[in-house]
Image (cartoon, helix red, strand yellow):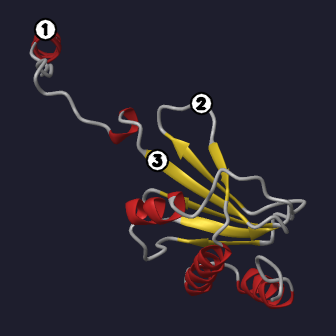
Amino acid sequence: MILLLVGLGIFFCCQWVPSGGSTVENYWLHGDTLLIRLSDGTGWEMEVYREGRGDIRYGRHPNNVLTFEQLGLHFDSLCRHLEGSHKKEKNKSFRPARVAYLVSDAKDEHTEILNNLELGKELFQIAFEAGLEGKGDLRAKRRMHKLFLTRPPFGKQ
C-alpha cells in the first residue's frame, strides 16, 4: 500500500507541463473563413465547411438533405471566386441569391447578394453530384434527385 501511494505521488509530481514556447497554433484564432453558405432564394441551400464536407438541402423538411464528405474544390479558392461574384448594388428580385461567410473571430455571418448565378448553379451541381455519390439513404437520394430535376436551384432557365 505504501508503494502504491509513493508511486502515485511521484506520478502526479512529475507530469509533463508544456513550456511557454510550445503553444499550438489554431486556425480558429486567425480570422479564417470556416463556413460558406449559399442560398438561391427559392429554397435551396448549400453549406460547405473548411474541411470540404457539407450538405445541400431544399426547404425546411429534415429529409430533403444530401450530405457529402468532400466537395472536390479547394476551400480558399472557392472563397476567392465567391468574393468576386457579388456586388454592393441593390437587387430587385424578391429573394435574391445570397452567399454568407462565417469567419472564426466574428459573432455573425457576413452575407452578400450573389450576382453570378452561373457560378451558383455550377456549385449546386457539384455539391449535388457529391451528395449522390456519398453515403446516405437511397430514398433520400431519390427524393432529392426528383426535387433537383423538377425544382432546380435558381429556377428553370
What percent of the width, then of the height, locates residue 24?
Answer: 22, 33
Q: Quadrant of residue 27?
A: top left
Residue 130 versus residue 27 in the image, above or below: below
Looking at the rendered structure, which numbered label has been put on residue 33?
3
Local secondary structure at mark 2: loop
Identity of the residue drawn at 76% across and 80% down: 140
Mark 3 crowd level (few <14, some 14–19, many ≥20, 10 Å Cα) = many
Looking at the rendered structure, which numbered label has been put on residue 107?
2
Identity of the residue drawn at 50% across and 41% down: 103
Looking at the rendered structure, which numbered label has been put on residue 2?
1
Verify CB contact (< 8 Å) between mark 2 and mark 3.
Answer: no
Identity of the residue drawn at 37% across and 32% down: 29
What percent of the width, then of the height, locates residue 146?
Answer: 82, 89
Mark 2 crowd level (few <14, some 14–19, many ≥20, 10 Å Cα) = few
**Which label sits in the foreground, 1 or 2?**
2
Q: Residue furthest front?
A: 89
